[in-house]
Image (cartoon, rainbow, N blue to C red):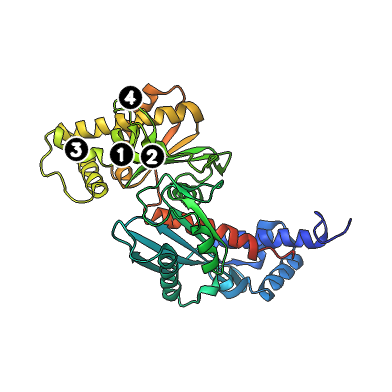
């Protein structure tokens, strides 16, 4: 019906649009005065005053201090109320679950790590998830019911057609067909699930090297080799959630792996995954190759090679760069992205020397030539992406003043 609250252009909808614009500005800029908010939004002083009064009454903004160091009287400053809402994220690996809670401004207010060693989980997955979440909630000084939304990041992906986890046979306990229903019953907030590398791409798009880019590929190399595809500003997940599972990609220079899901590997993983780097180092005669988890050993070797940059270390970096570019050439040829972001410890450890080598190799192997950059989000990027994803949906919900 014309004139209803939901009709575009009605006063309520226009007020809600102005409210959201002001809240987004406060999130982006930090404390602002009424005058500055008015200038940035194009609103008159009376309208800006009414807007701030409305948001303050709704508990979405707080008056905090005054501006100083400018001519004239000090003006009241306003900020988004951090306690207006909270969201949570989980980063799940076979070894541990890392949980965090953030306030609506994006500040992490509580973290907790739950070790989950062993091929068989000591506790059911639902108990692991709730224990990890509760640990972060407690660290934040909150209750579970204070969290508006939870995003869980895992290797592989939950197939939207079946609800079952695929492409992650190494994640014990997460393959039950009833798992999602059990988690929904155990948790009082909406829960979303996302591939871990996709979450790294979200973190880089919101906070890091991919800001302002609508078409990019993120290549991740740490415990496994994978990619995230952002096309037209949106994640491309594929029909079964498996878009970007490039570790299974057949590539020249590596044996053809058949029944890849049973082997949990493929050509690209064998050629350029983290587990290939210690083996290559030994073949090149590099001494004192680190032992222990191969992802950590690979990162240490790549960092050392990028620093020494001569002899067998230089050959290690060059061979690794060629392997990376070989798989990237297929992705680039099909997708033609604007940007490729290199992320994960086995890539970021190489810094600019590795990036430059991969860029040069890729320009030899592919017709299109995207720019390569090293990712900027280094501290728990999967968890950061989970929080950013949860916060985006939470803000859409709590910042909507048209309801």
> Callout 1: helix, strand or loop?
loop
Kindly state the secondary structure of the residue where label 2 is placed: helix
Q: Which residue is mark 3?
A: 279
Find the distance from the CA under tag 4 to the CA under tag 1: 14 Å
Nearer the observer: mark 2 or 4; the answer is 2
In this orientation, does residue 25 appear?
no
Cα–Cα span, label 2 and label 3: 23 Å
Callout 4 touching callout 1 (CB < 8 Å): no
Indicate whether 60 appears above or below 213. below
Residue at numbered disc 2: 261
Residue 73, given in percent of the width and then of the height, sits at 62, 74
Few, some or many residues within 10 Å of mark 1 (<14, 14–19, 20+):
many
Q: Secondary structure at mark 4?
A: loop
From what the image shows, is residue 267 above or below residue 142? above
Marks 4 and 3, how far apart at CA: 18 Å
The secondary structure type at the circle numbered 3 is: helix
- Would residue 119 be found to the left or right of residue 328 on screen? left
Cα–Cα gap, marks 1 and 3: 11 Å
Asked if residue 68 shows in the view, the reply is yes
Which numbered dot is residue 273? 1
Q: In which quadrant of the rendered image does the C terminus lie?
A: bottom right
Task: Tell me residue 305's x, y (percent).
Answer: 21, 39
Disc nearer the start of the sequence (1/2): 2
Name which residue lies at 24% across and 46% down: 294
Pointer 1 with pointer 3, Cβ within 8 A: no
Give the residue number, with chain letter if any, for mark 4: 252
Give the side of residue 248 with respect to residue 84, left or right: left
Instruction: Please rate how many residues cluster around mark 2, counting C-alpha atoms within 10 Å: few if below 14, some from 14 to 19, many from 20.
Output: some
Spatial separation of the CA atoms under disc 1 and disc 2: 16 Å
Q: Is residue 364 left or right of residue 289?
A: right
In the image, residue 88 sits, relative to residue 218, either above or below, namely below
């Amino acid at each position: 019906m014309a004139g209803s609250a939901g009709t575009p252009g009605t006063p309520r909808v226009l007020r809600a649009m102005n409210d959201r614009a002001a809240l987004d500005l406060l999130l982006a800029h930090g404390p602002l005065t009424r005058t500055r908010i008015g200038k940035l939004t194009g609103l008159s002083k009376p309208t800006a005053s009414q807007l701030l009064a409305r948001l303050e009454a709704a508990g979405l903004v707080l008056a905090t201090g005054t501006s100083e160091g400018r001519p004239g009287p000090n003006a009241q400053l306003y900020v988004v109320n951090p306690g207006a809402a909270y969201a949570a994220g989980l980063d799940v690996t076979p070894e541990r679950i890392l949980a965090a809670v953030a306030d609506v401004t994006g500040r992490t207010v509580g973290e907790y790590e739950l070790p989950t060693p062993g091929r068989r989980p000591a506790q059911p997955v639902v108990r692991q998830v709730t224990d990890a979440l509760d640990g972060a909630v407690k660290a934040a000084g909150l209750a579970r019911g204070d969290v508006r939304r939870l995003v869980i990041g895992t290797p592989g992906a939950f197939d939207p057609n079946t609800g079952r986890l695929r492409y992650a046979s190494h994640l014990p306990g997460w393959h039950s067909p009833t798992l999602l229903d059990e988690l929904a019953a155990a948790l009082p907030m909406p829960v979303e699930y996302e591939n871990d590398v996709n979450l790294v791409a979200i973190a880089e798009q919101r906070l890091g090297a991919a800001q302002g880019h609508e078409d990019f590929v993120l290549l991740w190399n740490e415990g496994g080799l994978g990619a995230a595809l952002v096309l037209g500003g949106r994640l491309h997940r594929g029909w079964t959630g498996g878009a970007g599972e490039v570790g299974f990609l057949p590539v020249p220079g590596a044996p053809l792996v058949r029944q890849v899901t049973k082997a949990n590997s493929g050509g690209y993983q064998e050629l350029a995954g983290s587990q290939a780097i210690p083996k290559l180092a030994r073949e090149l005669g590099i001494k004192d190759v680190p032992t222990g988890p191969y992802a950590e050993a690979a990162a240490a070797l790549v960092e050392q090679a990028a620093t020494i940059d001569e002899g067998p270390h230089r050959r290690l970096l060059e061979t690794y760069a060629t392997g990376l570019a070989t798989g990237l050439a297929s992705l680039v040829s099909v997708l033609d992205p604007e940007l490729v972001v290199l992320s994960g410890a086995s890539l970021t450890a190489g810094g600019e020397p590795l990036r430059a080598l991969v860029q040069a190799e890729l320009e030899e192997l592919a017709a299109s030539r995207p720019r390569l950059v090293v990712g900027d989000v280094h501290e728990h990027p999967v968890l950061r992406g989970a929080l950013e994803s949860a916060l985006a949906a939470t803000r859409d919900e709590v910042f909507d003043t048209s309801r």
